[in-house]
Image (cartoon, rainbow, N blue to C red):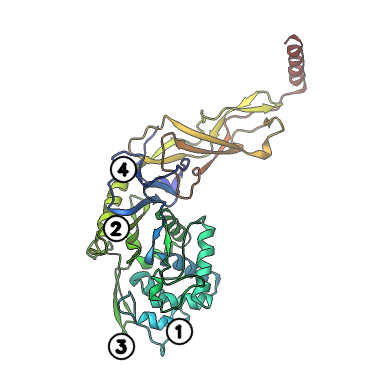
């Protein structure tokens, strides 16, 4: 097996494939090289977003408060609305009584908004993404959907489309409902709180980066002035202190979203790109995180150190390698009775450092339209003809993929040409079979 660089550029040029999703419990599970650090948080989770490969799962399936990490869902809907032409970045919108009142609460993260002023979608979005401005978030939600409850309906529909089922979403900001001055989602109460698992938040971040990677252009800004050059100018320092120049700076971190409430504690979804690979990290309710707001970044730093040092991309098959774990396919009316299956492209796995790829689990899914009633492929077959897909895993992978998939699929092809047998060969086979049946 040929070994590539740790988290090398292979994710760009090869296909990473993975394994069956296990059942998790509250303990940490890793397919360890060096043992993962114990993260001082109620939950911790790491994925590689291109494949969805889970690298660490510490209580990642318990539903917990998400606070302002909620705004990643709002950001997705904003980008989608711009893409559809429902709103524009330079569109000016008014400020409702509700958005204004929330924005004036200095105990919350906000840029104070005025009702005798209009603001563009872009500047309100920047305030939301950089400074977690809550009034600004509500104003955009109302501009897109007409009201915050209707926007929440859009959020709910969106997360369900990603396969997220066990969640609670009641507002666009992640604030406690008790901070919304009675503007509650129908059926919710003052005690209702937005909540998801760390796995589900990782999926939200994965989908945001997959569809709208340009979000990082804003989330990576350490400091920006809101309404610069006006009497309303306010300095917005990003709550993500891992960005360049801030107190918990880590090179290559460029997002994504913090969140803090009494219910959720201190939370953070981080992302970094190192050695041409990106990871997404999630920490929820970090121990003593509200007393020390930098603690969530300390824990995230440990997670990133470990992930980048202990996972690597390793080649399992090169293009045209015969996949010996797949039984040769039976051929109908061919000069040969079977045809071997080969990799249609290079296949690489993201695995803990030093993993032995001699013990692979390969699941083959034939191309159904090629099979007859006896599950045979019919000759003639040309070399490199597509004959189905495989899912390749290491036998001992216990972590799987974030959305429960069996792994990334790779196409497989015929390893050699099998010509159609002529009538004399077919007649001879029939006679041989007939005689064999008589004797048998």
Looking at the image, tell me whether mark 2 or mark 3 is earlier in sequence order: 3
User: Quick check: 210 left or right of 256?
Assistant: right
Please tell me whether mark 2 or mark 3 is closer to you in this view. 2
Crowding around mark 2 (Cα neighbors within 10 Å: few <14, some 14 to 19, many 20+) is many
* Quadrant of the snapshot with the N terminus: top left
Identify the residue position indicated by label 1 in the image.
96
Foreground residue among 266 and 307: 266
Element marked by disc 1: loop
Identify the residue position indicated by label 4 in the image.
310
Q: Is residue 86 above or below residue 73?
A: below
Identify the residue position indicated by label 2 in the image.
286
Whether residue 153 appears in this view of the structure is yes
Element marked by disc 4: helix
Please tell me whether mark 2 or mark 1 is closer to you in this view. 2
Q: Between marks 2 and 1, how big is the CA–CA gap?
A: 35 Å
Q: Residue at x 34, y 82 (%)?
A: 104
Residue 244 is tagged as none
Crowding around mark 1 (Cα neighbors within 10 Å: few <14, some 14 to 19, many 20+) is some
Q: Between marks 4 and 3, how big is the CA–CA gap?
A: 51 Å
Identify the residue position indicated by label 3 in the image.
231
Looking at the image, tell me whether mark 2 or mark 1 is earlier in sequence order: 1
Q: Quadrant of residue 246?
A: bottom left
Taking the view exactly as shown, the residue that stands out farthest to the bottom is 116
Q: Residue at x 74, y 16 (%)?
A: 433
């Amino acid at each position: 097996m040929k070994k590539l660089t740790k988290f090398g550029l292979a994710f760009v040029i090869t296909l990473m494939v993975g394994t069956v999703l296990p059942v998790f419990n509250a303990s940490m599970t890793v397919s360890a090289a060096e043992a993962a650090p114990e993260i001082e948080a109620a939950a911790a989770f790491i994925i590689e977003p291109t494949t969805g490969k889970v690298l660490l799962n510490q209580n990642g399936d318990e539903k917990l408060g998400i606070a302002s990490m909620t705004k990643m869902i709002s950001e997705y809907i904003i980008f989608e609305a711009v893409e559809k032409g429902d709103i524009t970045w330079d569109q000016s919108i008014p400020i409702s009584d509700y958005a204004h009142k929330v924005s004036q609460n200095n105990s919350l993260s906000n840029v104070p908004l005025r009702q005798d002023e209009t603001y563009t979608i872009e500047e309100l979005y920047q305030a939301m993404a950089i400074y977690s401005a809550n009034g600004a978030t509500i104003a955009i939600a109302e501009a897109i959907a007409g009201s915050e409850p209707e926007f929440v309906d859009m959020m709910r529909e969106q997360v369900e489309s990603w396969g997220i089922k066990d969640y609670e979403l009641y507002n666009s900001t992640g604030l406690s409902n008790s901070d919304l001055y009675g503007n509650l989602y129908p059926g919710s109460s003052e005690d209702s709180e937005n909540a998801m698992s760390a796995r589900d938040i990782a999926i939200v971040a994965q989908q945001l980066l997959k569809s709208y990677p340009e979000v990082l252009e804003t989330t990576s800004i350490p400091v920006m002035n809101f309404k610069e050059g006006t009497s309303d100018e306010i300095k917005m320092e990003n709550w993500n202190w891992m960005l360049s120049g801030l107190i918990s700076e880590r090179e290559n971190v460029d997002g994504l979203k913090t969140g803090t409430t009494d219910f959720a504690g201190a939370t953070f979804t981080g992302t970094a790109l190192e050695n041409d690979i990106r990871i997404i990290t999630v920490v929820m309710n970090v121990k003593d995180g509200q007393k020390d707001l930098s603690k969530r970044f300390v824990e995230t730093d440990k997670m990133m150190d470990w992930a980048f040092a202990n996972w690597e991309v390793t080649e399992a098959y090169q293009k045209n390698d015969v996949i010996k774990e797949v039984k040769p396919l039976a051929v109908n009316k061919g000069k040969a009775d079977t045809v071997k299956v080969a990799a249609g492209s290079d296949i690489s796995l993201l695995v803990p450092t030093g993993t032995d790829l001699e013990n692979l689990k390969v699941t083959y899914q034939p191309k159904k339209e090629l099979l007859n009633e006896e599950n045979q492929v019919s000759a003639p077959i040309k070399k490199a003809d597509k004959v189905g897909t495989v899912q390749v895993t290491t036998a001992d992978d216990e972590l799987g993929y974030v959305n429960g998939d069996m792994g990334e699929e790779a196409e497989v092809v015929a390893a050699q040409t099998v010509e159609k047998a002529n009538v004399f060969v077919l007649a001879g086979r029939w006679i041989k079979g007939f005689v064999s049946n008589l004797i048998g």
